[in-house]
Structures are given as structure tokens and as C-alpha cells.
Image (cartoon, rainbow, N blue to C red):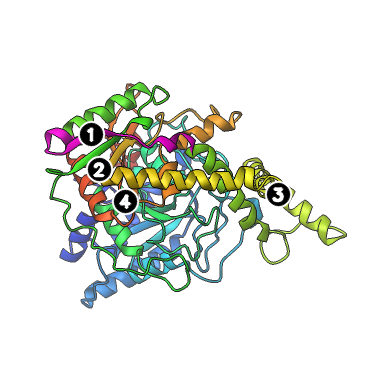
Amino acid sequence: MTDLADLSIVEAGRQLRSGDVTAVDLWEAAATRIAYTEPHLHAFLTVDREGALATAKVVDAAFRAGEDAGPLQGIPIALKDNMCTKGLATTASSRMLEGWVPPYDGTAVANLRNAGAVLVGKTNLDEFAMGSSTENSAFGTSRNPWDVDRVPGGSSGGSAGSVAVGSSMGAFGSDTGGSIRQPAALCGVVGMKPTYGLVSRYGLIAFASSLDQIGPFARSVEDAALLLEGVAGHDIHDATSYRGEYPTLTDGLEKGVKGLRVGIVKELMVDAIDSEIRAATRAMADKLSDAGADVVEVSLPSSEYALSAYYLIAPAECSANLARLDGVRYGNRVPADTTDEMMAKTRAAGFGPEVTRRILLGTYALSAGYYDAFYGQAQRVRTLVRQDFATAYEQTDVLISPTTPTTAFEIGAKTDDPIAMYYSDVCTIPSNLAGDPSISVPVGVDTRGLPIGFQIMAPALGESMLFRVAAEVERLAEFSARPSLAVSKETV
């Protein structure tokens, strides 16, 4: 018998509506899985046991009354701890916000509550979403469920790990330079970054405002589409929120790829990408070709400079955004004799080394005499990246590449080499600079048994096509492996 924690969102929804299970049953299954896996993984910073159980009881009463709020009603979902939750601590994994409880829900969180989702708790991340391994959390490192001596990726490592082991059926993270897709690849789940503006950023603690975007983690492409539908939509509280019509993302998942034009990005298939990952990407490209797609090689020449441009733009924006954390209005404060001294001591105590590094880099890039040489030049590169994508999409419907240059690496392997850590996002950053949607789908494991992610990219607002191709990749990959920690204690 399948453990309830291992059900897909789609199947759980069917069983809820047939009366075979209740929302309380699903929450209790998630809670049992959390109790077994958390001592190994540290995926969560907060588990809202009382709140989740209370919501589940309300949902069950709604079902009995014939009230149906949609496919996420009664589904246990986890939230990255940089998404504001009313009455529940939101720390962004930083000492600076330790214990801070927001007075409001972010729009995505409010949408999930309105959809009847059972919000399990808040997941661990790299501090203020700055990192690729979840080792930068002020509250301890999360671990990869496939090998607990390895990282789960970052910055949304806790969300990815929770979905991989079934302590949530779905989760949300934020993606600034790959922080959903990279941990999804390393943890063997589906992770998707929407078009910039498709999901409101209101209530998301800002890292880099022109790049941040909320998106879903799931164990299937269809589940990911349902999760995105649950939070997408225009929001008057976010000036960058998309105002047009929103597509139904689950339509067309069975259409396949026959007749579609698929471009494999040659700059992301270089020797610096692990040979097993390149081989898995080529193998899937061949399967797409056999399934009727026209697969061709395309070039994104400016992507060579995307990583460098990103690490000027993102730190510059983080320098501006994190200036509000000064010990005056909210967050922690270190007492001192003068205001200037208090701010300096508060920030020194509150910000970790990686956040400090990026604030200093961003402040320098924005300073007089260096602005045009660094930040201005990086923005010009960003424009070139966008133009390269636009040209590529004139020839293709979607682009494909590896999601990551390596599979999950050992904890501590890159902490002393920031450049090596930054390179973990080399395949994902270009889509963030362009503002386009992209998704990672697991397609296999390497010789060490670690999952490999396959990235699909589409033009802005091309989510329907993106999910269509991703669904075909999922069918062709037939990826069914699960980490050993996904097995509940009762069935071990």
C-alpha cells in the first residue's frame, strides 16, 4: 500500500474528493515523514503543527459541506522561509530577522490559503537566498536526501529536500539565479521558475528585485503546473505583476513534442559540465527527436558573460534592498551609544559572511566612479543575453540544456571557493537575466546514484509550451528513483 506521503498532488486530490482520505490524514502522513526525516535533513526551520492540523480540519469540514476551492485544497505544502507568513516566524535564515513574525501574508501565501492548502511550515535556505548549497543558513545546513553528506543545492534547498522525501507534497521557493531549478536537480524533483512577474513578489523578502521570482517544487510536472496555477495572477501590490491573461497550465500536457522545434544550447554543453550530465542531456535530446521534435543546436553567445553580469547586478540590488535592515525599524538590534555604532554592530552581528560579501560587492559596483564600468556594463550584457534568447526563439519553440554543471557535491567542498560555488548556477542564470520561464526535470542518476536535472527554457509567458515539453521529457525519462529517506519509518 502506498504511503499517503508519497501520493502525487493529483492522486491525493482524487482520494480527498472520493472520501478515501481526509486532509487530516494527509497532514498526519506528512508529519510522520517529517518526524523521521528531519533529524537527517534539517529541511525545515519551522513546522506549524497546530496551524496545519487546524487548517486540515477546516478543509475536511468544507469537503463535507460540498465546498471545493480547487486542486490544492487539503494538500500539504511547504514554504521557503523568505515568504512572509502572518503569525509565523519568517527569518530568511538570518540572525538579522531571527524570531521576526510578519503582520501579513505575502500574496502567494494568501493565494495558497484561499485555495485551501495546508501550509506545513517554513523551509531552510541560504541566508537571504544568497547561495547554491543551503550551507549559508544561520540556523544550520540542510542535507541532500540522496546522500546526507552532500548539499541539497540552494538557495531553496529545504523546499527541494522536503518534496523529495515527502514531508510535503509540494513546496515553493524563490529563484533569483537558479535557486529553484538547481536544488530541484540535485534533489531529483521538478522545480520551475516562472516568467518574471507571473507570480507576485509582494511579501517575498527581496534579494534582487529585477530577478527574484517565486515558483514551485513537485514530484511531477503536472503537480508543478497545479502549484503554479494556485499562486499566479495579477496583484496590485506588485508594480511588476503581469496584467494580461493567464494561461491554464495543465491543458496540453498530453500533446507531446511532435513538430516542435527544440534547440540545445551549445554554450551549456561544454567540457566544464560533468560528462555524465552532458551524456544524459544528449540522450534526452535524442529521445525528443525520436518522439518527433526537430532538435537543433543553437547559440547564446552572450551567455558566456551571464555569470559575471549576474554577480554584479544581483549584489548591487541586494545592497540596496538590505539597507533597510539597520536595527531601527524591525529585526534584531545590537545596543550601542550612537545610531551609527548601533547600525554597524547590528549588521556585523546579523549578516553572515556570504551576505556581507555580496553587500560589499554590490555597494562597490554602485559607487561613484565605478557604476558605469561595473553595474552599467553588466546591464548592457543583460540586454545582449535577452537579445540572444529572442533570436534563438525565432528558430525554436523551447531550448534545452543541463540544469547544473555537477550533481550534488559534498558539504564543505566549495565553501572556501566562492567562484566555484557561483559556477553552480552557470546553466540557470541566463533565464533569470532574460526574465523567461524555465524548468528542471529529473532524467536519471549518475554512477554514484545522484540525480541529474534536465533544463527546459521557453520565451516569456511560454509556460504552457514549457510544461507541455516538460511532461514529455518526464514520460520519456521514466524517472522513478526515490532517495532512501523518502521511505517512512513505518515501512523501513
Labels 4 & 2 near each other (Cβ < 8 A): no
User: The magenta stretch spans which residues?
Assistant: 288-305
Residue 188, image quadrant:
top left
Upstream in sequence: badge 2 or badge 1: 1
Mark sitting earlier along the chain (2/3):
3
Residue beneath label 2, please?
Answer: 395
User: x%, y% of residue 385?
Assistant: 43, 43
Labelled pair 3, 1 in contact (Cβ < 8 Å): no
Q: Which residue in the rendered view is the most extreme toward the right?
A: 337
Instruction: Choose the circle earlier in sequence order: 4 or 2.
Output: 2
For the residues labelled 3 and 1, the Cα–Cα distance comes to 44 Å
For the residues labelled 3 and 4, the Cα–Cα distance comes to 34 Å
For label 4, the residue is 459
Q: Is residue 446 visible?
A: no
Does 479 appear above or below 62?
A: above
Q: Mark 1 sits on what residue?
A: 296
Q: Which residue is mark 3?
A: 367
